[in-house]
Image: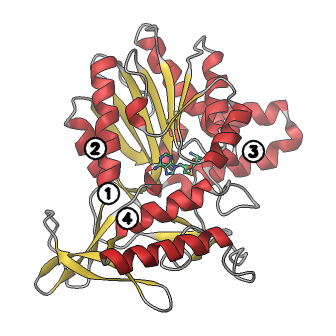
Amino acid sequence: MRRRASRPPMLSRRGKPPDAMSLADALRERIAAEGPISVADYMEAANAAYYASRDPLGAAGDFITAPEISQMFGELIGLWLADLWLRAGKPGGVHYAELGPGRGTLAADALRAMRGIGLQPPVELVETSPALRDEQLSRLAAARWHDNVDSLPAQGPLLIVANEFFDALPVRQFERQADGWRELVVTADGKGFRREAGPPAEEQLPPAEPGAIAERSPASVAVAATLARRLAARGGAALFIDYGHERHCVGDTLQAVSGHAYADPWAAPGTRDLTAHVDFEALHDAAKAEGVRVYGAIGQGAWLRAMGIDLRAAQLAKSAPERTEEIVAARERLSAPEQMGRLFKVMALVAPGWPEPEGF
Ligand code: SAH
């Protein structure tokens, strides 16, 4: 969860580290040679450099995510997947596939819960960051790694999870001008980077007042379509969890976070985490067009409660009474509407012939 905290950005006193200097320089050179670049190209280059160079998770890093808050999160996801597999008649040849697995914590918790139900699938991780691949290796020694979803196994059903993955994928941005929508492009000046109006948009964009900003993420739509095609052909299900909106909406949601505080997305690219809210309607439409059933998006809090987070928290507190306060606080943080329960959404894709999923 990228949330504001009281601590100032980590890098503010010491300036930019050398690798970020070189990304800013490389982008400046590219813009000087080719002209302004799209917001998506800027975001992609910034996040590739950012994730490649560090483990951003945890108190010492830049942000905290749900699986790092409590084991309950990954366990309930594992139970959701294993329950579908059981009711689908325990098909053979299934693989667990996770996109952007961070430290591997969610996968470790989910796989432990699945094991309890007799499911021990091979593990396939889609991860581009060498630093995070090392973290994942320490928890999931037998996993196989992929640079993108195209190389996931083509045989057998897939049980897919993506938590806070789509928000890191690049978005294009468009601004409504008096004469219609224009794409925003990124240019460089002496001080740093800034956006300006570029060419007229060819996309279908909604009616809006001048000055309004709309976002589209072709990269996210392509991933959702590829996964849905795999599910429709081979069986299985996917669970996408992220912050975002159920319907297309207008607004500039691109944000940067560093050291648990908001930062300027247009400065020091590669040193801060860039994200945008996920447009679940776009993922829904892309997946449905490939022939899978789509459920949600619904609030993370409602989904976790339907999956039994209250019972799981009570069980954990009973077996470790001295941790009761911490367990209750984690349950609240994950599911209370004013915390992660409402902004974060859960969407499921289910293959034709597979049963109705729990929790929706
Ligand atoms: N799911 C984890 C981590 C979320 S952070 C958690 O909940 O804790 C985003 C993750 O996506 C990181 O593992 C990052 O390295 C990965 N990532 C970002 N962009 C990616 C891309 N284009 N392809 C594959 N992985 C990517």
Distance between the Cα atoms at labels 2 and 1?
13 Å
Distance between the Cα atoms at labels 3 and 4?
41 Å
Q: Amino acid at mark 4?
A: Asp
Q: Which residue does the numbered mark 1 point to in the structure image?
A: 217
Q: Nearer the viewer, mark 4 or mark 2?
A: 4
Q: Residue at x 36, y 70 (%)?
A: 39
Q: Nearer the viewer, mark 2 or mark 1?
A: 1
- Tag 2's secondary structure? helix
| Colouring convention used in this rendered image of the protein | secondary structure
Q: Nearer the viewer, mark 3 or mark 4?
A: 4
Viewer-proximal residue, 342 or 52? 52
Pointer 3: residues within 10 angstroms few (<14), some, or many (20+)?
A: many
Quadrant containing the C terminus in the rendered view: top left
Q: Amino acid at mark 2?
A: His
Q: Which residue does the numbered mark 2 point to in the structure image?
A: 284
Quadrant containing the N terminus in the rendered view: bottom right
Q: Residue at x 52, y 75 (%)?
A: 24
Q: Amino acid at mark 3?
A: Ile
Q: Which residue does the numbered mark 3 point to in the structure image?
A: 327
